[in-house]
Image (spheres, grey):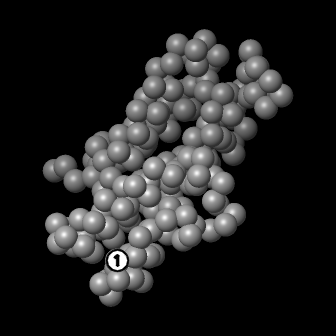
Amino acid sequence: MKVVAPRLATAVWLDKWFENAAKSYTYRKLGGVPLDEVKNLRNMILAKKHVAEVAAKVMEEHWTRNNHVKIGEGHVDRKMLPLVREHASGMFEDLENIREAVKEGKMSVEEAILREHFEIFLLARALDELKKLMSHPENLAENPRPLGPGDEYVVKLEKFEEAYKVLKGILRLYS
C-alpha cells in the first residue's frame, strides 16, 4: 500500500539527493561524500524541518479556528531565518497553495496539518541518519583531494549508502 505524499517534492528531493550522491563518479573516486556536502544537506533539512514545524503550529493554532493566516518569514525563529532564506524559502509558496486550497474547501485543515507532520517525520528521519554519519569517527575518512580548509573529510561511501538504504524504504512510501 502506497501512502500519499505530504509534499511529494520533499520525499523525491531527499531520495534524489541521496541517490545522486551515492552514484556520483566524483564521490566514488574520493571514496566518500565530502563532509561539507553532508553538512550542507543537514542545513537544508534543518531549514525545511523548521518551516514545516512552524507551519504545523500555525495551522493548529489558527487555521483550526478558521483564521487562515498566511505563513511567512514572520513566523520563523529569528535565529533560523538566514538558514530558511538560503535553503527553504520556496516552502512558503507551497504553504500558500495549501492555505488557498483549505480556504476554498479543496483540502481540510486536518489534511494540511497531517501533510506537515508527515514532512516533519521525513525530515527528522533524514536528519537522524545524517547526524549518525557525521558524529561517528568510523564513518569518516580523510579526503584524498581536499579543495580547501573545510574539506578535509569525507563520509565513507559504504556508510553513506547504508544510511541511504535505511531512508530509502521510508522515502519510497512517500514518493
How many callouts does the rendering have?
Answer: 1
* Residue 142 placement: quadrant: top right
For residue 67, above or below residue 131 = below
At x 30%, y 63%, the residue is 98
What is the residue that sits farthest to the bottom in this orientation?
A: 65
Res. 90 in view: yes
- Residue at the (31%, 59%) spot, across then down: 97
Q: Nearer the viewer, residue 129 or 124?
A: 124
Taking the image as shown, residue 140 lies to the left or right of residue 47, namely right
State the image quarter where residue 79 is shown: bottom right
Q: Quadrant location of the C terminus?
A: top left
Q: Which is more toward the observer, 130 or 123?
A: 123
Which residue: 45% across, 75% down?
A: 57
Q: Is residue 122 above or below residue 65?
A: above
Residue 10: x and y, percent?
A: 39, 47
The residue sitting at 16% across, 50% down in the picture is 1
Spot occupied by residue 49 in the image (x, y as percentages of width and height): 51, 58
Q: Amino acid at mark 1?
A: His
Callout 1: helix, strand or loop?
loop
Where residue 138 sits in the image (x, y, percent)? 69, 35
Is 56 situated above or below 90? below
Residue in the foreground of this view, choosing between 153 and 104? 104
Whether residue 128 is visible here, answered yes or no, is no
The crowd level at tag 1 (other Cα within 10 Å; few <14, some 14-19, many 20+) is some
Q: Is residue 149 above or below residue 61?
A: above
Q: To which residue does mark 1 refer? A: 68
Q: Could you say which is closer to the camera, residue 135 or residue 57? A: 57
